Image (tube, rainbow, N blue to C red):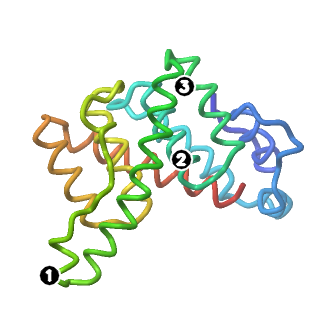
Amino acid sequence: MFGTTNTTDNAVALLKDLGLSEEHVSDNLKLLASTDSKYLRDLKINVTNALAAETLSKKEAYLLALAVAMNEKNVLLQNAFTVFAKAEGANEKEVAETISCTSLLTANNVYYRFRHFMHDEFYSNAQAGIRMSIMANPILGKEFFELLSLAVSALNGCELCVTSHEKTLIAHGTAKQRIHDAVRLSAVIKSLVVLM
């Protein structure tokens, strides 16, 4: 999966690797292909390398990619990464929890980013009032749920959430390389979404 091809075929090959047909080649991808852009080859390599990170299982990598696609509202990639995650053993509940985590973190990221921006005692001390019972006993396990939470928070630019989830992951014994790989995967998949 996600091998290299010559530059003129990279747009179609990239989508084919994702289980998508040639009809889904966007205008952006067509432009890059028609100009023989070297970036298409780089993108394929980046996606391949990020999904193959040694610190992430295939299932985890695809669930992280699914969270990015969901967060960035790309239904094509959401469907593709759901298929790949299920092929690696993810069940319906795990997929649903990934989607739920993404939705919850989007709310948290907006709320806590606002609090951070305001530097105001009232907002800092106000009760969030956002239900988060899903975090108590996640099907995916607390460590991976935190990793998903960190990745989505990094995408949404919430410093408070990123530092909080990173601290929790370190307390769980998560290696910094695993954290790095999850965030890098999220960044690379977002760069793919931009072209879709």
Q: Secondary structure at mark 3?
A: helix
Q: Earlier in the sequence, mark 2 or mark 3?
A: 2
Q: Earlier in the sequence, mark 2 or mark 1?
A: 2
Residue 12, quarter of picture: top right
Q: Which mark, residue 46?
A: 2
Say which residue appears at 77% left-offset and 48% top-offset.
11
Rendering coords of residue 127 (x, y %): 21, 64
Rendering coords of residue 180 (x, y %): 31, 48
Amino acid type assigned to the residue bearing label 2 in the image = Asn
| Mark 2 vs mark 1: in front | 1
Compared with 42, 175 (above or below) is above
* Horizontal side, residue 55 vs residue 67: left or right: left
Amino acid type assigned to the residue bearing label 3 in the image = Ala
Q: Earlier in the sequence, mark 3 or mark 1?
A: 3
Q: Secondary structure at mark 1?
A: helix
Query: Which quadrant of the rendered structure holds the C terminus?
Result: bottom right
Amino acid type assigned to the residue bearing label 1 in the image = Glu
Pointer 1 local density, CA inside 10 Å: few below 14, some 14–19, many at least 20:
few
Say which residue appears at 36% left-offset and 30% top-offset.
54
Q: Which mark, residue 85?
A: 3
| Count of numbered badges drawn on the protein | 3
Query: Which quadrant of the rendered structure holds the N terminus?
Result: top right
Q: Secondary structure at mark 2?
A: helix
User: How far, Cα to Cα, is label 2 from label 1?
Assistant: 43 Å
Compared with 13, 191 (above or below) is below
Pointer 2 local density, CA inside 10 Å: few below 14, some 14–19, many at least 20:
many
